[in-house]
């Protein structure tokens, strides 16, 4: 009976193993079918795949041109901003110089009436210059407007600069394979075909092994049934069958 129990315990993992192997074979067959379809697809489209190489050159040139234009735009933007800032500074300096000249240019009394009244204590009258006829509020407003325009220019320039910088960062993040890195050759297609053939042969061998394992599992079940009928006694025929199966299964595994 001990032998019968051992054989019974042995039969369970053997059957489970056979089931697991059958599932592996099924997955391998599905993968093989997909490989065949892929191989056929590659063979059919191989002449058309040449566009990848030429398109790679085109894309590289396009992005290089775009990057060059953006960098030139950045340089022009910085140059324009600096120029406008310099022009604004020049304008302020010119306005300040003109104001000083107007303050130094005295007006003859018989030409224009002085807006200044004599000092109540000293009786002196402040020098009458052309500056006295300038609207200082308008001058101040003009200077404020110049500063506002300059600030708006800086804001616009900073925004454009950031947009260009973002575009350049995106371009830097784009990975385009170089043409020499794209290998679509007929030799590669043939190599895939050989791998498919090897997979086909391996699948056929595995299928044969699965059939053999199934056969040995059936024989093991028959032996267990015979021993149960014989009261747990292992016949010489069943012993020889188990011995032969043991040798054959070890070769398969």
Image (spheres, helix red, strand yellow):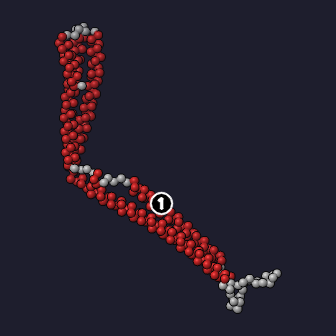
Number of callouts in the render?
1
- Does 47 sit left or right of 159 as displayed? left
List x then y, in percent, for residue 196.
21, 40
127 to 142, vertically: above or below: below
Residue furthest right in the image: 121
In the foreground, 81 or 146: 81
Q: Quadrant of residue 214?
A: top left
* Identity of the residue drawn at 70% across and 84% down: 128
218 to 103, vertically: above or below: above
* Identity of the residue drawn at 44% across and 61% down: 164
Q: Callout 1: helix, strand or loop?
A: helix
Decide if residue 131 is in sight here.
no
List x then y, in percent, for residue 106.
68, 86
Quarter of the picture containing the C terminus is: top left
* Identity of the residue drawn at 19% across and 28% down: 208
- Does 109 sit left or right of 52 as displayed? right
144 to 213, vertically: above or below: below
Quarter of the picture containing the N terminus is: top left
Q: Quadrant of residue 251?
A: top left
In the foreground, 186 or 27: 186
List x then y, in percent, for residue 13.
29, 21
The residue at which mark 1 appears reads as: 162
* Identity of the residue drawn at 21% across and 37% down: 199
List x then y, in percent, for residue 191.
21, 43
Decide if residue 240 is in sight here.
yes
Q: Quadrant of residue 213?
A: top left
Residue furthest bottom in the image: 110
């Amino acid at each position: 009976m001990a032998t019968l129990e051992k054989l019974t315990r042995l039969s369970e993992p053997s059957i489970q193993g056979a089931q697991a192997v059958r599932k592996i074979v099924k997955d391998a067959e599905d993968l093989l079918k997909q490989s065949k379809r892929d191989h056929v697809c590659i063979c059919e489209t191989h002449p058309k795949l040449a566009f990848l190489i030429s398109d790679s050159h085109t894309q590289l040139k396009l992005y290089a041109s775009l990057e060059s234009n953006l960098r030139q735009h950045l340089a022009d933007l910085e140059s324009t901003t600096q120029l406008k800032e310099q022009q604004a500074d020049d304008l302020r300096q010119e306005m300040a110089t003109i104001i000083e000249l107007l303050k130094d240019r005295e007006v003859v009394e018989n030409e224009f009436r002085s807006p200044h009244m004599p000092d109540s204590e000293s009786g002196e009258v402040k020098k009458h210059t052309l500056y006295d006829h300038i609207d200082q509020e308008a001058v101040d407003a003009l200077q404020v407007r110049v500063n506002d325009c300059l600030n708006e220019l800086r804001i616009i320039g900073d925004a454009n600069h950031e947009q260009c910088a973002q575009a350049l960062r995106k371009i830097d993040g784009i990975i385009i394979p170089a043409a020499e890195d794209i290998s679509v050759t007929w030799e590669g297609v043939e190599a895939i075909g050989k791998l498919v053939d090897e997979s086909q042969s391996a699948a056929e061998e595995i299928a044969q092994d699965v059939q053999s394992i199934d056969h040995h599992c059936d024989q093991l079940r028959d032996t267990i049934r015979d021993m149960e009928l014989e009261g747990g006694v292992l016949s010489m025929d069943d012993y020889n069958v188990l011995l032969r199966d043991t040798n054959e299964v070890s070769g398969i595994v």
